[in-house]
């Protein structure tokens, strides 16, 4: 029972079989609405509540013969019963306060909780492994938590992978960095951090006293920013000393796919590269190829933003092909052999930062279009071809699984803060040699000088004071573009900031494309 409805004679009822809430006539539900005027929990556990309904007609609680309750419904009921038995004790005022705190939480974003589907978890021997650090269930643990000491299960890992890089327009985390869920959040006041912690984790990991202390703070720095002595840290929450590198290992693919044989390709005569750039933006891929010294024979671009096209035409004289949906088989056949297909399809409808995401019914369809073009070119020309798709770093787990299944590989995380002072990240699929070994590269390039980085959201938001104080030329330098790169007629400063806020980081793209300098004709060779 979910509660009394404002419509006279009706009540809200939660149906476990459909996992939905409906309003139905109170009389049909066997409930007297007048008895709901007080506390709902008190009514349910009182003499006139559920027990009274059961005593009146116990058969109403039994399934009709031949239409027994499905097993997954019983699993949900047992889970709910266990949760209430452990956390709700009417005689315990402290437990009731915790319950009120949980039910008053306001979710900031759409939640894809690993704890919603407990029935899919692989249960282990109770005497075997320890509990998952996040969900606290005895399940198979697959990896370390990237920020705090403890191991997590597969479902919690997938949730954290979807939310750890999700930030709001102010640069602060939208989800809890401990569990990956949303809700009412504590947010670190340090400008270089912005990590968030949910109230549920606060109660479980910190304790009610610590939660009260944090709530009373006007300027609170989290446990990752001001780690104290182990004895002074909250119970069960110990930051990792090497958490930046652990974060990279956390996002490493489970298996490394087979890529094109670089040694075989090196033996043939090198030639200039032919590129098809989908969703080209302001030409980050073109700038990266120039940084690597790779000579470009042809560079086709697909971009619909007229301001971005103005920049690439002014700087490189790029030939644009129009809308991506105009790239049919006939047009692709006129392009000739393509050596590299690269692009960043808009993925707002696949991101956990979007509260109204449409998935593959919205902009997510463009990722599938990218895949279609890659497959069609591979079949059409039947020759070695490299490709790279760059998307949001906070993609919803179910969408990431679909794309990984279609590409037949897991993605990698490309994080620019290990290469430069700029904070920018992306999820990448592709067959560029060595791209699935970026974790090993980051260990040698680990940069601790990133405490005052700007996020791409800060730069693109005109109302952000910190972004307003940064000159456009400085933003171009942070992203790796030449000075005045976006200074093309008739773009003003606001438009140039918007374009840079949506652009790729050239340092990161250069690093991932570096092996191509040993395959195609280049002024210099890069290992």
Image: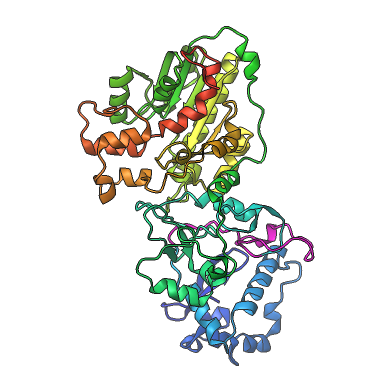
Is 345 above or below relative to 228? above
The image quadrant where one finds the N terminus is bottom right
Is 527 above or below relative to 194? above
Asked where in the image residue 472 lies, by quadrant, the reply is top left
Asked where in the image residue 375 lies, by quadrant, the reply is top right
Asked where in the image residue 235 lies, by quadrant, the reply is bottom right
Is 151 above or below relative to 315? below
Residue at x-position 53% and y-position 72%? 203
Q: How many marks?
A: 0
Residue at x-position 55% and y-position 36%? 444
The rendered magenta stretch, by its main secondary structure, is classed as loop
The one of 175 and 479 positioned closer to us in this rendering: 479
Residue 308 sits inside the magenta stretch: no
Residue 133 sits inside the magenta stretch: yes
Residue at x-position 73% and y-position 68%? 68
* Residue 429 in the image, given as x and y percentages of width and height: 55, 34
The image quadrant where one finds the C terminus is top right
Q: Which residues are magenta?
A: 108-136
Is 294 above or below relative to 208? above
Q: Please identify the residue farthest to the bottom as the structure is shown.
A: 47
Q: Is residue 169 visible?
A: yes
* Residue 480 in the image, given as x and y percentages of width and height: 37, 31
Q: Please identify the residue farthest to the top as the structure is shown.
A: 269
The one of 130 and 457 positioned closer to us in this rendering: 130
* Residue 329 in the image, given as x and y percentages of width and height: 50, 19
* Residue 305 in the image, given as x and y percentages of width and height: 32, 31
Residue at x-position 47% and y-position 41%? 447
Q: Is residue 3 visible?
A: no
Say how the picture is coloured. rainbow
């Amino acid at each position: 029972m979910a509660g009394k409805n404002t419509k006279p004679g009706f009540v809200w009822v939660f149906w476990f079989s459909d996992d939905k809430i409906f309003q139905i006539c109170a009389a049909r539900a066997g409930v007297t609405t007048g008895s709901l005027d007080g506390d709902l929990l008190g009514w349910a556990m009182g003499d006139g509540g559920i027990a009274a309904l059961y005593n009146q007609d116990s058969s109403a609680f039994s399934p009709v013969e031949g239409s027994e309750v499905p097993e997954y419904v019983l699993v949900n009921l047992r889970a709910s019963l266990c949760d209430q038995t452990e956390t709700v004790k009417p005689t315990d005022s402290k437990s009731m306060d915790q319950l009120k705190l949980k039910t008053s939480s306001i979710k900031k974003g759409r939640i894809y909780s690993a704890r919603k589907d407990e029935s899919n978890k692989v249960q282990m021997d109770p005497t075997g492994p320890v509990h998952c650090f996040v969900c606290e269930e005895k399940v198979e643990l697959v990896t370390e938590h990237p920020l705090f000491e403890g191991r997590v299960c597969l479902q919690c890992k997938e949730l954290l992978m979807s939310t750890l890089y999700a930030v709001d327009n102010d640069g602060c985390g939208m989800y809890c960095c401990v569990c990956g869920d949303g809700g009412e959040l504590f947010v670190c006041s340090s400008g270089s951090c912005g990590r968030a912690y949910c109230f549920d984790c606060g109660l479980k990991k910190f304790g009610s006293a610590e939660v009260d202390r944090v709530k009373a703070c006007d300027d609170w720095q989290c446990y990752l920013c001001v780690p104290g002595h182990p004895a002074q840290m909250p119970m069960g929450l110990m930051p990792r000393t090497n958490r930046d590198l652990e974060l990279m290992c956390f996002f490493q693919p489970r298996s490394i796919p087979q890529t094109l044989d670089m040694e075989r390709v090196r033996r043939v005569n090198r030639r200039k590269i032919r590129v098809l750039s989908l969703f080209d933006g302001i030409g980050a891929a073109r700038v990266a190829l120039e940084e690597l010294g790779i000579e470009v024979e042809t560079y086709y671009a697909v971009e619909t933003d007229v301001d971005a096209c103005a920049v690439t035409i002014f700087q490189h004289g790029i030939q644009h092909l129009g809308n991506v949906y105009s790239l049919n088989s006939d047009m692709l056949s006129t392009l000739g052999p393509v050596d590299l297909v690269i692009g960043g399809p808009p993925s707002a409808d696949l991101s956990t930062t979007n509260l109204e995401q449409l998935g593959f019914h919205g902009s997510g369809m463009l990722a599938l279009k990218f895949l279609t073009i890659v497959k069609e070119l591979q079949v059409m020309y039947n020759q070695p071809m490299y490709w790279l798709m760059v998307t949001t770093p906070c993609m919803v787990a179910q969408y990431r699984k679909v794309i990984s299944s279609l590409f037949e590989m897991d993605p990698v995380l490309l994080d620019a803060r290990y290469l430069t002072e700029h904070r920018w990240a992306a999820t990448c699929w592709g067959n560029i040699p060595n791209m699935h070994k970026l974790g090993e590269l980051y260990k040698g390039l680990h940069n601790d000088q990133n405490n005052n980085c700007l996020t791409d959201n800060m730069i693109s938001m005109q109302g952000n004071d910190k972004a307003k104080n940064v000159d456009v030329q400085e933003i171009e330098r942070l992203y790796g573009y030449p000075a005045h790169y976006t200074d093309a007629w008739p773009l003003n400063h606001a438009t140039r900031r918007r374009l840079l806020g949506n652009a790729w980081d050239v340092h990161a793209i250069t690093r991932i494309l570096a092996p191509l300098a040993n395959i195609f004709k280049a002024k210099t060779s890069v290992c």
